[in-house]
Amino acid sequence: MGSQDEELSPESLLTRVARQDRAAYRRLYDLSSSKLFGVALRICRERSLAEEAFQEAFIGIWRTAADFDPLRGSALAWMAGVTRNRSLDLLRKRGRGDRPVEDDEIEKLLAEAGHMRADQADLNALLQCLERLEETPRQAVMLAYCAGLTRDELAARFAAPANTVKTWLRRALQALRGCLEE
Amino acid sequence: MAESEEDDLNAAERALGTAPRDGESAAQHQARKGWDAMLAPLALAAPPAEPPADMFARIERGLDSGAESAKIIHLAERRARRWRAVAFATSGIAACLVVVVGAGLIMLAENLRITAPAPQQSYVALVTPEGGGGPAMIVEVNTTTGIATLRALRVDKPADRSLELWRIPPGGAAQSLGLVDPGRSVSLINAALEPGDTLAVTVEPPGGAPGGVATGPIVLSGPLIETR
C-alpha cells in the first residue's frame, strides 16, 4: 500500500481526469483499455462497432468523470458500466436483429464471470448474490445485461410471455439489491 | 427523494436494458444511477481484448474537436457545481430560498451604503441529453439585460423535424421559447426565466409543435440554476 500505488489506482486517476488532467487520462487508458475494449466487444460482437463504441465511451469518461461516485463502487466498474451502456445504445441504434445470441452464450458468460471474480471484489459480491437467484431469472438478468437481450428476446428464448419475463426481471433486481445491502 | 416502487422498478429495467432509456427525464436518470452502479461490476465480466494501437490517438482527436465546447461546459459546470454545493449544504429548497433572499438583502444593504452598481445576476442551465452524457446545450440568462443566450453545442436534429425549446416552470405547463438549430447560438430577449425552471428540448414536426403544445419526446433537459 505505498503512496505510489494509491496515486496510480483507477480511483485516483479518475478523480484527476475529472479535473481535466490529460496525463492521468492517458494512464487510465493504459490501465483499463483492454478490459474496457473487452466489454465493448462482448456487447457489440463485431470489431468495427466495438471500436466506435469504445472510442465514444472513453471520450464520455473524460466528459463525465465528475459523475463517478466512489461510494457506489470501483472506478473500473463505473467505466465498464459507461462502456457497456454506450455499446448497447450504439448496437440498438444500428439495429442488431440479424445477429442472434448463440445458445451457448450464457454458459460462456458465466464461465467468464467466474474467471474474473477473484480480482474484482464488487463483481464477486454481485455474482454471489446472483447465485442465490433461481436459474431462469438469473440467466435472464445475465443475458439482458451482458448480451443486451430485450424483454421480447428473453420471452422467446425462455418460451414465456413478455409480462412474465418482466416480473422475473423486476423481482430478480430487487432481490439482488436486497442481497447486496445485507 | 420519494419515488414510487413502480418508478424505481422502471429505473431498474432501464439500467438492465430491458426498458428504453431514450426520453428519460432528469429525475428518471437520477433514479437509474443507483441501479447502474449496482449492475456495473457485471459489465467487467468480459474477457479482455486489445484495442487497435491508434485508438488513443483517435480518442484524443475526438476530444480536441470538441475541446472548445468542452471548455465552456467545464466552466459552466464548475459554476453550477459551486451553486449546488451551497444548495446541498443548506439542505432543501426552502433553505436555498432563504440564502438567496438573505444574500439579496445583504447586497441591497451594501448598495445603500456604498452606492455600488446594481448587483448583476445570472442563471445558467446545462441542458443534457436524456439518457446521460455531458451538456449538449447551455442557456445563460443575464437578469440585468434580460437576455438569454443559448449555445447549442452537440445537438442532433432528426431529418424533417424541428427541435423546440421549452420553459417548464415548477408545477406549470410548458411554454415554447422557439425553435433551436444545432450549432447555432441564439439570443432570446426578455425571456421570462426563473431559477428552478426546467428547460427542455423536444422533437417536433417541421416548424414547431402545432398549437403550442409539445408533442414529441424530450431529447434534452436541465434545470435553470443561479450562478452568482
Image (tube, helix red, strand yellow):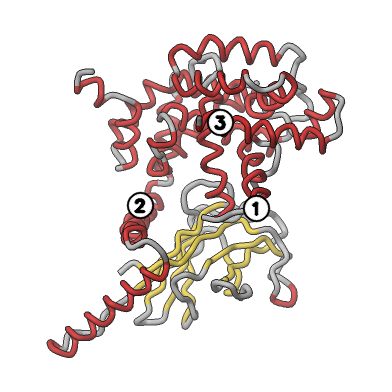
Residue B227: which quarter of the image? bottom left
Toward the front, the furthest residue is: A182
The disc numbered 3 marks a residue on which chain? B
Count of residue discs: 3
Could you tell me how far apart the alpha carbons at marks 3 and 1 are, in whole angstroms? 21 Å
* Residue nearest the observer in this picture, B102 or B217: B102
The residue that label 2 is drawn on is B74
Dividing the picture into quadrants, the one containing residue B119 is: bottom left
Q: At which x and y percent is residue B97?
A: 37, 73
Q: Where does label 3 land, which residue?
A: B39
Q: Give the chain letter at badge 1.
A: B
Q: Position of residue A36 (x, y in %)?
A: 49, 24
For residue B70, which numbered disc appears in the image?
A: none
Label 1 close to label 2 by CB (< 8 Å)? no
Callout 3 amino acid: Leu
Camera-side residue of A60 and B88: B88
Q: Assign a secondary structure to mark 2.
A: helix
Q: Mark 1 points at which residue?
A: B23
| Mark sitting earlier along the chain (1/2) | 1
